[in-house]
Amino acid sequence: MPPVAGGRGHDGDTVTVLLLAACLWVWPTAPATPYVDPVGARVSRLRLPARSVPVLLLLLPVVPAVMLGGSAAVILSAAVGGGTAGLLVRSASVRRRQAREQAEVLDAVRALRREVAAGADLGTAVAAVRRARGPAVTDLLGRVGSPTGDGGPGPPQFAGAEFALTSAVRLARRFGAPLTVLLDGVAAGLADGRRAADQRAAAVAGARLSGWVLAALPLMGVLLGAGMGADPVPVLFGGGLGSVLLLVGTVLLCAGLLWSARIAR
């Protein structure tokens, strides 16, 4: 079909290329270094790349801007705004997931201590605790409970917990130290870390909220101008100097959001 006037045919081709590139970018991939269970079972989990959320949120405003024939400045503004929203959503999702996994690790250590105190050996206790745990905790316990005490590199957020657990297991194996007492110390340290993280989150909650309020002020100004009859929307999205100002304002606004999120992290 020949392209219609205004280049809408080329716009449709651009949207198609963007969607295909996004599908390839967010395609699920297997981890490069699958975890090897101590009993020899090779575990490889299919996972969605963490970069998929920023890409999808970036395309959400860009595709309508391209299809509606927006200028280059408008499309760039949509890309900057969508990409920033994706990064902020991904960062919040990562924080929630890490907090949930750290709570699961603490619960698993306490359950492991109860199993050992009941008379189970380390291998049996680890196998019992791993049955009802998530993938992250299962991998961590598998590395700690391996005969050599080293099951390969783990996630960075579990480095402290893995070091403490591995040290406790090695002390118990080499010097006969009571494992229950050592696990009590590990659980106490993890609980202190969780309390400190919760206190930090509560301390920066006000600053994070202030950043969002300040970021919403330009949008409220545009809505206020539209309500007063100034009609700023056609000026900003109609091309020319208005669209350039829209791009500059969007870049500054997104830079401020990212900077305030980094400070409050």
Image: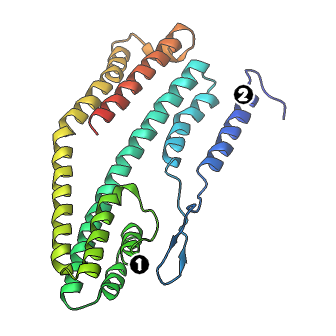
Which of 166 and 123 lies nearest the eye of the viewer?
166
Q: Position of residue 27 (x, y in %)?
A: 61, 54
Is residue 250 shown above or below 173? above
Left or right? Give the position of 89 relative to 120: right
Give the total of numbered labels.
Answer: 2
The N terminus lies in quadrant: top right
**Dot 1: within a 10 Å radius of its alpha carbon, few (fewer than 14), some, or many (20 or more) residues?**
some
Left or right? Give the position of 108 relative to 73: left
Residue at numbered disc 2 = 8
Which of 191 and 131 lies nearest the eye of the viewer?
191
Q: Helix or strand or loop: what does disc 1 sit on?
A: loop
Which of 127 and 165 lies nearest the eye of the viewer?
165
Residue 158 seen in the figure? yes
Which quadrant of the structure image shows residue 34?
A: bottom right
Question: Colour scheme of this structure image?
Answer: rainbow
Q: Position of residue 48 (x, y in %)?
A: 53, 57
Which of 147 and 213 lies nearest the eye of the viewer?
147
The residue lying at 32 percent from left, 62 percent from top is 101
Left or right? Give the position of 100 relative to 181: right
Residue at numbered disc 1 = 146
What's the amino acid at mark 1? Ser
Which of the numbered marks, if any, corresponds to residue 32?
Answer: none
Left or right? Give the position of 7 relative to 90: right
**Dot 2: within a 10 Å radius of its alpha carbon, few (fewer than 14), some, or many (20 or more) residues?**
some
